[in-house]
Image (cartoon, rainbow, N blue to C red):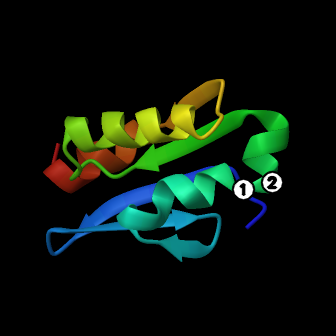
Amino acid sequence: DASNHLAMRLLERHFIAHLGKNPVRFAELELRLRTNEKLQSEREMYIHADGSLRYQDVITVMSLASKAGADKVGLITDPMSSREESGQ
């Protein structure tokens, strides 16, 4: 996969991630990041984490991205989406 964008969410208490458009199991995540051409050439990773994920899970993924070669790891946020989900 040639994308350095990772979207993560929980679905019925199961971790779901997509690297670009391709699904990735958590157990495979570090290897997939290490072999990702775009991440290895640009040294950047962008993570869009759903509000249902635990903070520790997001930090763990950020750490994996760093170990896989990302010098810069960014979080993509959508605060309005979180407010709408909570009914505010």
Looking at the rendered structure, the secondary structure element under dot 1 is loop
Q: CA distance from mark 2 to mark 1?
A: 4 Å
Residue count near mark 2 (Cα–Cα under 10 Å), binned few <14, some 14–19, many ≥20: some
Q: From the viewer's perspective, is residue 52 above or below residue 62?
A: below
Which of the two residues, 62 or 35, is positioned nearer the viewer here?
35
**What residue appears at the point 33 percent right and 33 percent down from the top-left corner?**
59
Name which quarter of the figure residue 45 lies in: top right
Looking at the rendered structure, the secondary structure element under dot 2 is helix
Quadrant housing the C terminus: top left
- Asked if disc 2 and disc 1 are in contact, CB closer than 8 Å, the reply is yes
**What residue appears at the point 46 percent right and 41 percent down from the top-left corner?**
64
Which residue reaches farthest top?
71
In the image, taking residue 14 as reference, residue 80 lies left or right, namely: right
Q: From the viewer's perspective, is residue 62 above or below residue 18?
A: above
Residue 49: percent from left, percent from top: 39, 48
Q: Amino acid at mark 2?
A: Glu
In the image, taking residue 32 as reference, residue 36 lies left or right, namely: right
Disc sitting over residue 36 in the figure? 1
Q: From the viewer's perspective, is residue 86 above or below residue 11?
A: above
In the image, taking residue 23 as reference, residue 52 lies left or right, namely: left
Residue count near mark 1 (Cα–Cα under 10 Å), binned few <14, some 14–19, many ≥20: some
| Residue highlighted by disc 2 | 37
In the image, taking residue 23 as reference, residue 3 lies left or right, namely: right
Which of the two residues, 57 or 49, is positioned nearer the viewer here?
57
Q: Amino acid at mark 1?
A: Asn
Quadrant housing the N terminus: bottom right
Residue 67: percent from left, percent from top: 53, 34
Count all numbered tags in the image, as a single digit.
Answer: 2
Q: From the viewer's perspective, is residue 9 above or below residue 14?
A: above
Residue 47: percent from left, percent from top: 51, 44
